[in-house]
Image: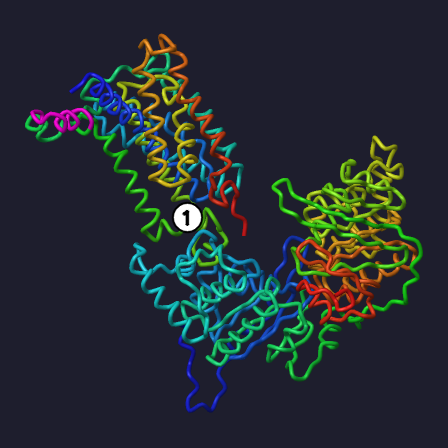
Amino acid sequence: MAGAAEPLGGASKPPPAIELRAVSKSFGLVQANKNIDLVVQPGTIHGIIGENGAGKSTLMNILYGLHQADSGEMIINGAPVQIHSSADAIACGIGMVHQHFMLVPNFTVLENVMLGSEGGMLLAEGREETRATLQKLAEEYGMTVDADALAGDLPVGLQQRVEIIKALKGGAKILILDEPTGVLTPQEAVSLFKILETLKQDGVTILLITHKLEEIMAATDTVSIMRQGEMVGHRATAETNPEELAELMVGRKVLLRVDKGTSQPSDVKLSTSGLSCTSPEGVQFIRDVSFEVRAGEILGVAGIAGNGQSELLEALAGMRPPTTGTIEILGQTITADGQSDPQIMRRVGLAHIPEDRHKFGLVLGFEARENAILGYHYAKQTGDGRLIESKAVTAHCQALMSAHDVRPDNPYLTAKNFSGGNQQKLVIAREMHAAPGVLIVGQPTRGVDIGAIEFIHKELIALRDAGAAILLVSVELEEVLGLADRIMVMNNGEQVGIIDRSEANEQTLGLMMAGIAPEKAA
Amino acid sequence: MSEFALQLLLTFDATLRLAAPLILCAMAGIFSERSGVIDISLEGKMLSAAFTAAAVAHLSGSPWLGVMAAVTVSMALGIVHGFACITHRGNQVVSGLAINILASGLTVTIGIALFRQGGQTPPLTSGERFGPITWWFVEGLNTIPLIGTIYRELISGHNVLVYLALAAVPLSAWLLYKTRFGLRLRAVGEVPEAVDSAGVSVVWLRYRAVIIAGLLCGIAGAYLSTGQGAGFVREMSAGKGYIALAAVIFGKWRPAQALGACLMFGFLEAGAARLQGVELPLIGEAPVQLMLALPYIMTVLLLAGFIGRAHPPAAIGEPYVK
C-alpha cells in the first residue's frame, strides 16, 4: 500500500485519490483521449459519463494499465506513478470491474478470486487464505457468494459481485466500475449501489463509468462529463440535473422525449395469424401469435428479453420458418410449409433492421459502401444485377450517408471502425432506402449514444408518417412507450395482449410482461 | 498359467511400450492446448527429437546426451511455434503444420548429410540406447505363480523412459491442479483477459506451456529412436503425434483420461501386432494391413463420435490481443 502522508492533526486536506493531468491517447488516427484532467477526492463516488465512443473506457483502461497513455501524468494518493500493466495498477491499490466480466466460467468462485494472488507456488495454502478473505468481505459489505460454486453457473449479478471481490481482495482503495449496470436487472442494480455506498463509507474511492443519467444522479457525489475524447465538464451531482448533463454529453440540447403526431393508420400491411415457431429440438419459441400492423402505425413489441421477441422477428424476416400459422405481408401470404427466405421477404417489400447488427446487420470487415448494398446487391442501381459497379456503389453509399447523418461520411471506411450509433445508422439507412411498405426493427438503439438515439427515433416516426407499417421490438420500455401507437406484450412466447398506447404505462406493461393479461381481456 | 493369460499379459506389456510415446506427447498436448495454443506440431517435434537423440547417441555413445539434445531441439521448435503463434499471433494450425513439414524433411536431409544411409542413422549398439531395467527381487518373486510373472513381464523390464512417461501423468496432473502455475495455465486457455487483468503475463504463461510441451515431446522422440527402437528411421513417428492429439481430445484435456486413451490406442496397436497371421473364428486369418490400420481407423471413428461432445479450452486457437 502506498503510504500516503497522513495529514498532521487533520488540519490539511488529504491529497486526491486520483489525479490525472493532461492524459492523451490515440489509436492510429483516432484521438481517444485528449488532454484529460481529472481529480477525484478520496472516499467519494465519482461518475464519468459520456456517449459510447466518448473515450471513457479508454481512460479507465489507461488508469488500470491495460493501455499506455501517449502523454500526461497520473498521481495516485499524492504520489506520481507510472502504470504500465494491471500488475502496476493493483500495486497502486486500484481494482477494476470490467464491462465484460473477466471470470473463468469453469473455475469456482474461489479459484477465480485467487487467480493472480495465489499466495505461493502451491494452491492449498492460498485457498484457505482466500476463503478467509471471502468470508471477511461477505461480513463487512454483505457480499455473500458461494465460494465453491462454478462462476459460470452464477447469475449475472453474483458474477459481478465476484468481480468486485476480485478487485477488492488485495485491499484496493480505488475501485473502477465500467458500465456496471448494463447487464443487471433493476433489482440487482439496486443491490450493487447499496454495496457501493457501504464501500464508500469504508473509505473506498469509486469511479463509476456509465452512460445512464439516472445512475449518475442517484449514486454519485461528483461527475465528469466526456465528449469525443475530451473532458467537457466537472460537476457536483447535487448542483446539476439530467438535462444539463445530457446537453454536455451531446454538445447541444437533447429531446429526452420523442416528438410525434398522432398516427393515421390505414390498411393492414403486415399480419400474422396463429403463428408458432418450434425449434428442431422441440422448444417452442412463439405460440399462436396473431396481430395486424397497419400502414402509418408503429406496433411496439415489449417483453423481458428472451420471451420470443427475437424469434418473432426472425420468423417475420424469413430467417426462421414458422411451424404453423401464416404471415401476410402486403397481400402475399407466407404459410408454414411454404418456403420462407429473407430474400423472398425482401422482394415482397419487407425491410429488416436486425437486433444484432454485428451478427446479422453488417459484415464488420467490409467497407461501408459494401455494407450499404448488402441484401440489395441484386438491384440494378449498383450494377446490372450480376456485376457490381464500384462507382455506383460508392455514390449510393455517399448519398445514404449524407441523408442519414452517418459519420464519418467515408464510404471506404471499414464497418468495424464506425461507432455503434453510426453502424446502426448505416443499417437503418440501407433498409429505409429500400422504401419498404413494412419495416421490422429489433432494438434499434441498443448500444447507441443519445444523439443517435434521437436521430433514429425521428427517422422511424418519419417513415411511419410516410405510410410504412412498422413493427418495433425493444426491451427498453421507454422506447416502446415513446414510439409505439399500439403495444403488444409477449411472455414466454405468447402474446399477453395488445393495448393502445394511451392505455399503457410502465405499470400495466410491467404486469403484462410478467404474464398477467390486462383486466379488459380477463 | 494358461497360454491365453500369458498372451494377454504379453500384450499388456507391449501396450505399455507402445503407449509410452503417446502418453508423453499427450501430456505435451495438454499443456500447450490448456494454455490456448493448438499444438499439431507434437508430431514434428517428436520426429525431430527422435532423429537428434539417435544421431547424438551414435556420435557421443551416450543415450543420455541423446535425450538432452533431443529435448533441446524439441523445446527450440516449441519456442518457434510460440514465436509464430504467441508473439506474432499467427495461425496456430498453420504454424504447427509448418513445423511438421520442416521436421519431416530436415531429419532426412541432415541424416543423409551426416550418415549417408538414406536418411537413417546407423543402428545403435546396446550401450548407445536405453536398455530394459530389471527390478529388484524379480528372481525372488518368480516363484510366486501369478504375481511373479506379472512383476517380471509387466512391471519390471522396461527402459527408463517408459517409467518416465508413466510418471509424467501424475506429475502433469499435480502441476495443473495443485500449483499456482497450473491454475494460471488453465485460466489462460479459457479467459486470457482474466489472467491479464489479474496482473499476470499471458504471453509468458503461454511460452512456458509450449516449452513444457517441447520438453515432453523431446523425451517421446528420444524414446522412439533410443528406447523402443535402435536408431532413427525416416518418418518413424508415423502419425503418433496426431494419435496423441486425438487422445488429448478424447481425454477431454485431462491427464488421467488422456492416459486412458493412450493406453487404449497402445493396446489396439499391440493387439494388432499380436493378431497378425492368427486364425480368428468367423474371419479367418486376420489381414495384416487391416490390423496395422486399426489404431488409425479407431482414431478417426472415436474423434468423429466424441469431438462434438468434448469441450476444448474456450480460448484455444485464439491469439491474445489486449
Name the residue carrying label 1: B186
Quadrant in the picture for residue A483 = bottom right
Looking at the picture, how far across and down is residue A91, in whole percent? 42, 66
Q: On screen, A108 above or below A23?
A: above
Q: Nearer the viewer, residue A399 or B29?
A: B29
Q: What is the chief secondary structure element of the magenta stretch?
A: helix
Residue A66 image point, x, y percent: 52, 58
Looking at the image, which residue is at 33% across and 12% down? B276
| A314 up-or-down from A98: above or below | above
Asked if residue A22 lies left or right of residue A395, the reply is: left
A341 with respect to B68 (left or right): right
A59 vs A403: above or below: below
| Quadrant in the rendering for residue B119 | top left
Q: Find the magenta span and give its range.
A: B142-154
Q: Is residue A361 visible?
A: no
In the rendered image, is residue B298 in sight?
Answer: yes
Disc 1 secondary structure class? helix
Q: Position of residue A42 (x, y in %)?
A: 51, 79
Q: Chain of mark 1?
A: B
- Is A328 inside the magenta-drawn segment? no
Q: What amino acid is at disc 1?
A: Arg
